[in-house]
Image (tube, grey):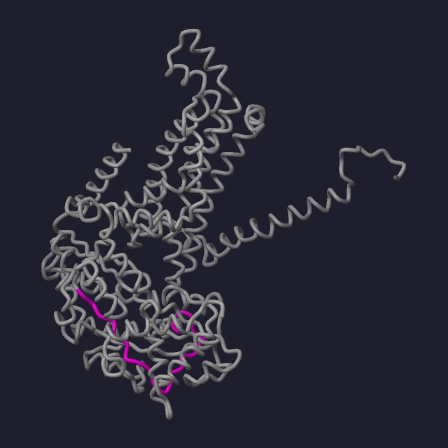
């Protein structure tokens, strides 16, 4: 030992520097650099060209479609996620483990398979295909199919975030509220919801980011109709294959910006409510 | 869940009834390299139709590998017309989903093929590997880029072109052809699902020494990146015939039969033939053909009808499950 005092729970300085450099280098090489290249390619022909690629009608329709699909899928999954977490954490019932396992299913199934499931159910050769067609209801290759596929892949985000949190918090506060005469609904609104609000917001942000970015499942059910059923990620692919690299990277940059915005929002939340969040993320 | 479904259904109905009578939209399910072609043809037709009827026609397109597009229409993609890479894919729609009659190919002139193409080689500038003809593709170390014949129409034409060359070469026969094609696919590092995917793999990602490509796709790549590639015409290739057809059941449901038929007939007009030639598809019209003569070198071409006994036979012999392609190609070997 060198005569110097060394905190026994701390690694040597050199090791700490080395590990930090590895981590930073890795992040820079595999995350920051590619992201920078996306923006560089988008601006290769100037800001005007990139902007033109984003406000072009097909691109705008892709942006609208993505926002609409996320706008429907995220609230539905939020409601579902809270109900599922509430049921799992605060109640005992048989089949609970099966429910928890099922919630995880979309994480383990490849998105392409999730898309194909809907083709098998709603496709013309599928179970409901001819019935839907006879009644002029379009699910596959239209907005409802895209929304369903998005819901499927983003289904676990909210529930997965809330279940451990709510299990951790236990039932004591709710039981106290009920025993003091509060109704189930007001117990939920005034006790449970305030306890989970930051975790919920965090989960919704993640869910939203994934909903906007989903490619595989949506690709299967979209039909790839230019200006109609192409979401932003699909539009990026289309432009790239059309030799329109500036356009492809401009839309990709917009998508990345939306994701970064989510990240910034999340960081502000964490910074502003650091203590509360730390208390919630013990698990 | 019921409520969600009914909400979604309501959204769907809203989305489909918002179109006005004077604003007609047609959906064209097409194969991969026709993105630029059908944009130009859609614009040309819309101008003509507007002058004639006052209605505005918008041609929406969906592009992808020819087989994948046929599959989407079978699964319910509401295409009014299909413009695919080869007849077998439209046959599949007729047989599996019964959306159009089995004799669809008789409904339009030239067996429903308004323009043709062929398969050529795209190599890097200056042709560093001196690739001149089919035997050069299987020299040691050469990497060939071509899409997957299971999903791509262009890939099936390329496969048949290679087969026809080897079978017709001096001393050639079916056994030699199988051997040559098997050897050829051993030189393929990656099979993309569509023709455009392969072009991007070759041009943008820089993989491979030679791209087996539609003539129109190779010429377009040349135009997009001047001075980077050369097109090589082999000593013989194949007459690629991409057909078009009306999807009867869909146009009747959308009440778009008249305009969809008019569009398909428009493809044969002198005006459209000039657009097709300009976009590097070989026109049927003699005037357009004469004007763009230098763009389409005359080489001997095999045909599916005379050399392979028609698409139905070619499809079942070579590309069906367990067919010749499955026998010769094992990924990773």
Front-most of residues B214 and B177 = B177
Left/right of residue A105 with respect to residue A7 in the rendered view: left
Q: Residue at x 56, y 49 (%)?
A: A31
Q: Position of residue B279 (x, y in %)?
A: 29, 72
Q: Residue B108 sits in which quadrant? A: bottom left
B249 in relation to A155, above or below: below
Front-most of residues A138 and A159 = A159
Toward the right, the furthest residue is: A3
Q: Residue at x 45, y 76 (%)?
A: B210
Q: Residue A153 sits in which quadrant? A: top left
Toward the top, the furthest residue is: A180
Q: Position of residue B122 (x, y in %)?
A: 42, 76
Quadrant assignment for the N terminus of chain B: top left
Residue B233 lies in the magenta-colored region: yes
Toward the bottom, the furthest residue is: B170
Residue A43 lies in the magenta-colored region: no
Magenta stretch in the rendered image? B222-245
Q: Residue at x 76, y 39 (%)?
A: A11
Q: Position of residue A200 (x, y in %)?
A: 46, 29
Front-most of residues B325 and A183 = B325
């Amino acid at each position: 030992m060198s005569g110097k005092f060394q905190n026994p729970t701390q690694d040597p300085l050199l090791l700490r520097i080395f590990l930090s450099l590895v981590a930073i280098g890795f992040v820079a090489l595999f995350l920051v650099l590619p992201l920078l290249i996306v923006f560089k390619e988008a601006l290769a022909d100037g800001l005007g060209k990139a902007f033109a690629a984003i406000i072009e009608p097909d691109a705008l329709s892709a942006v609208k479609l993505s926002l609409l699909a996320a706008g429907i899928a995220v609230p539905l999954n939020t409601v579902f996620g809270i109900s599922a977490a509430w049921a799992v954490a605060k109640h005992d019932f048989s089949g609970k483990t099966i429910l928890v396992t099922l919630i995880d299913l979309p994480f383990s199934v490849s998105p392409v398979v999730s898309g194909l499931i809907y083709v098998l159910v709603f496709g013309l050769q599928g179970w409901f295909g001819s019935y839907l067609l006879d009644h002029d209801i379009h699910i596959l290759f239209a907005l409802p199919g895209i929304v369903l596929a998005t819901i499927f892949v983003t289904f676990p985000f909210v529930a997965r975030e809330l279940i451990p949190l709510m299990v951790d918090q236990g039932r004591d506060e709710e039981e106290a509220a009920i025993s003091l005469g509060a109704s189930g609904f007001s117990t939920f609104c005034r006790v449970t919801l305030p306890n989970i609000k930051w975790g919920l917001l965090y989960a919704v942000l993640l869910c939203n980011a994934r909903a906007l970015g989903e490619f595989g499942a949506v690709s299967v059910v979209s039909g790839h109709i230019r200006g109609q059923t192409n979401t932003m990620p699909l539009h990026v692919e289309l432009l790239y294959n059309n030799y329109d690299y500036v356009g492809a990277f401009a839309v990709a940059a917009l998508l990345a910006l939306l994701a970064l915005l989510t990240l910034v929002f999340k960081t502000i939340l964490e910074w502003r409510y650091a203590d509360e969040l730390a208390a919630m993320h013990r698990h | 869940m019921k409520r969600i479904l009914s909400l979604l259904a309501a959204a769907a109905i809203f989305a489909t009834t918002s179109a006005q009578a004077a604003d007609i939209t047609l959906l064209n399910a097409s194969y991969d390299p026709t993105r630029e072609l059908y944009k130009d043809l859609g614009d040309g037709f819309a101008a003509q139709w507007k002058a004639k009827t006052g209605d505005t026609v918008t041609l929406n397109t969906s592009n992808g590998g020819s087989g994948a597009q046929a599959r989407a229409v079978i699964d319910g993609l509401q295409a009014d017309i299909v413009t695919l890479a080869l007849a077998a894919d439209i046959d599949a729609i007729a047989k599996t989903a019964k959306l159009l009659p089995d004799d669809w190919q008789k409904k339009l002139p030239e067996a429903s093929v308004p323009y043709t193409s062929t398969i050529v080689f795209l190599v890097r500038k200056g042709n560093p590997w001196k690739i001149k003809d089919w035997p050069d593709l299987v020299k040691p170390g050469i990497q060939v880029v071509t899409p997957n014949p299971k999903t791509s129409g262009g890939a099936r034409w390329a496969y048949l072109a290679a087969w026809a060359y080897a079978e017709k070469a001096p001393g050639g026969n079916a056994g030699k052809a199988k051997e040559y094609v098997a050897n050829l696919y051993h030189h393929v590092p990656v099979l993309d699902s569509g023709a455009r995917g392969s072009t991007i793999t070759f041009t943008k990602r820089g993989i491979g020494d030679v791209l087996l490509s539609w003539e129109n796709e190779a010429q377009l790549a040349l135009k997009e990146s001047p001075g980077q590639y050369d097109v090589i015409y082999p000593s013989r290739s194949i007459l690629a015939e991409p057909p078009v057809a009306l999807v009867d059941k869909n146009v009747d449901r959308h009440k778009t039969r008249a305009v969809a038929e008019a569009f398909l007939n428009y493809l044969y007009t002198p005006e459209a033939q000039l657009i097709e030639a300009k976009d590097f598809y070989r026109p049927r019209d003699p005037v357009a053909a004469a004007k763009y003569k230098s763009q389409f070198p005359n080489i001997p071409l095999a045909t599916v009808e005379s050399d392979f006994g028609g698409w139905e036979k070619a499809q079942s012999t070579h590309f069906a499950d367990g067919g010749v392609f499955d026998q010769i190609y094992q990924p990773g070997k």
